[in-house]
């Protein structure tokens, strides 16, 4: 007579179902947490900050955001006073050894850099040397190399015939070395100039008026943002006041020049509005400030490296005018 086969005991069905349910719930919670981490503290930093600013305090998503931030960090984002991450790579930034300092600036929608030029004589303007020939203007890298400068940014606007982005021909007027080198000196427009005694003037005027005021260098762009410490730009008056890469210039009460670049149109920085630029400059005691040509033109170089991340993957575009720092110009 054969032996009876012993029944093998398997996992009870109810336990199997329970374990499967726990696995499904666990996977779902993991995915949910990953989703909210990317939403509130993900790779698209500007998007994350914007989402947090829009949260209703006490809402479910507000509570979820607290998984990834302290209450102080959330408050700083919502108040548009985001603190600098000191672990960020800053190898291209200048310290004060050369009288130049470059500091990161942050807001809920933007990341950028502010160059503080303590010695006003260290700032100069360079103009397309091929202006009379029709040849393409240099890019910022080439200007810096040509004039043996330590750094610089883009400056005035340019004519963009056909929308090709070739910035060789200036917009408006250009004054260089105390002479009108381009444009109609009688046309009234937004101008940004530096006088012989190194004072910044930003206002609507004609080129000839600027020359009569002792302006040595001038480019065309705007609007003027701050005049004599007061906000000169009126909200709602400019359709271009949207989130964009920005370049701007200002001068503080002690004579320090300031060049600002703000990245935009990217996941980590959408860009800034005029109000953001004004706020940045006011924190540094700006007497006078104006918007420069931004967008794809926005670029800052310091000692051979781009400080910011230009919109174009190829770096700076051709520029009719640039500001140079510590250059032989």
Image: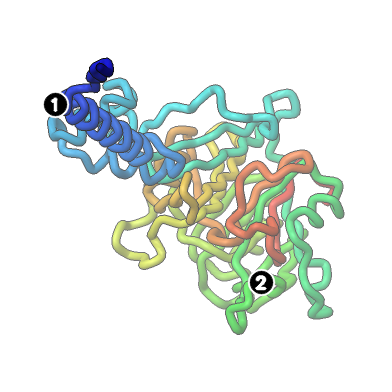
Q: Is residue 84 above or below residue 249?
A: above
User: Which disc is residue 170 wearing?
Assistant: 2
- Ranked by sequence position, the earlier of labels 1 and 2 is 1
Q: Is residue 285 visible?
A: yes
Q: Residue at x 18, y 30 (%)?
A: 17
Q: Secondary structure at mark 1?
A: helix
Residue drawn at the location 41% of the way across and 56% of the way down? 243
Label 2: state its secondary structure. Answer: loop
Q: Is residue 29 left or right of residue 17?
A: right
The residue lying toward the viewer, choosing from 4 and 77, is 4
State the residue at coordinates (48%, 56%): 265
Q: Position of residue 47 (x, y in %)?
A: 37, 46
Q: CA distance from mark 1 to mark 2?
A: 78 Å
Relative to 61, is 199 on the left or the right? right
**Quadrant (top left, top right, bottom left, bottom right) of the N terminus:** top left
Q: Quadrant of residue 137?
A: bottom right
The residue identified by callout 1 is: 14
* Left or right, 321 with reference to 71: right
Q: Position of residue 263 (x, y in %)?
A: 53, 49
Q: Which one is in front, 313 or 318?
A: 313
Q: Residue furthest front?
A: 1
Could you say which is closer to the camera, residue 101 or residue 286? 101
Q: Quadrant of residue 315?
A: bottom right
Q: From this viewpoint, which residue is outermost toward the bottom?
A: 162
Q: Nearer the viewer, residue 141 or 26?
A: 26
Does residue 72 sit above or below 295 in this rendering? above
| Left or right position of 91 against 28 | right
């Amino acid at each position: 007579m054969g032996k009876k086969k012993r029944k093998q005991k398997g996992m009870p069905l109810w336990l199997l179902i329970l374990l499967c349910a726990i696995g499904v719930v666990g996977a779902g919670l993991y995915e949910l947490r990953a989703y909210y981490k990317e939403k509130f503290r993900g790779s698209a930093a500007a998007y994350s900050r914007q989402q947090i600013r829009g949260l209703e305090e006490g809402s479910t998503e507000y509570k979820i955001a607290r998984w990834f931030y302290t209450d102080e960090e959330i408050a700083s984002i919502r108040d548009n006073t985001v603190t600098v991450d000191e672990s960020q790579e800053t190898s291209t930034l200048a310290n004060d050894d050369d009288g130049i300092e470059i500091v990161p600036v942050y807001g809920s929608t933007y990341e950028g850099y502010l160059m503080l030029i303590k010695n006003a004589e260290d700032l100069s303007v360079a103009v397309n040397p091929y202006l009379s020939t029709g040849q393409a203007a240099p890019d910022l890298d080439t200007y810096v190399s040509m004039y043996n400068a330590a750094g610089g940014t883009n400056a005035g606007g340019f004519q963009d015939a056909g929308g090709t982005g070739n910035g060789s021909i200036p917009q408006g007027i250009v004054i260089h070395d105390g002479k009108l080198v381009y444009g109609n000196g009688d046309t009234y427009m937004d101008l940004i100039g530096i006088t012989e005694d190194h004072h910044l003037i930003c206002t609507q005027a004609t080129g000839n008026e600027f020359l009569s005021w002792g302006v040595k260098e001038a480019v065309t762009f705007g609007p003027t943002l701050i005049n004599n410490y007061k906000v000169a730009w009126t909200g709602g008056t400019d359709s271009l006041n949207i989130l964009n890469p920005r370049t701007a210039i200002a001068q503080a009460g002690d004579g320090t020049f300031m060049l600002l670049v703000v990245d935009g149109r990217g996941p980590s920085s959408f860009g800034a509005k005029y109000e953001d630029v004004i706020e940045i400059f006011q924190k540094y005691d700006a007497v006078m400030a104006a918007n420069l040509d931004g967008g794809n033109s926005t670029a800052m170089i310091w000692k051979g490296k781009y400080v910011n991340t230009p919109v174009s993957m190829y770096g700076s575009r051709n520029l009719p005018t640039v500001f140079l720092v510590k250059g032989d110009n």
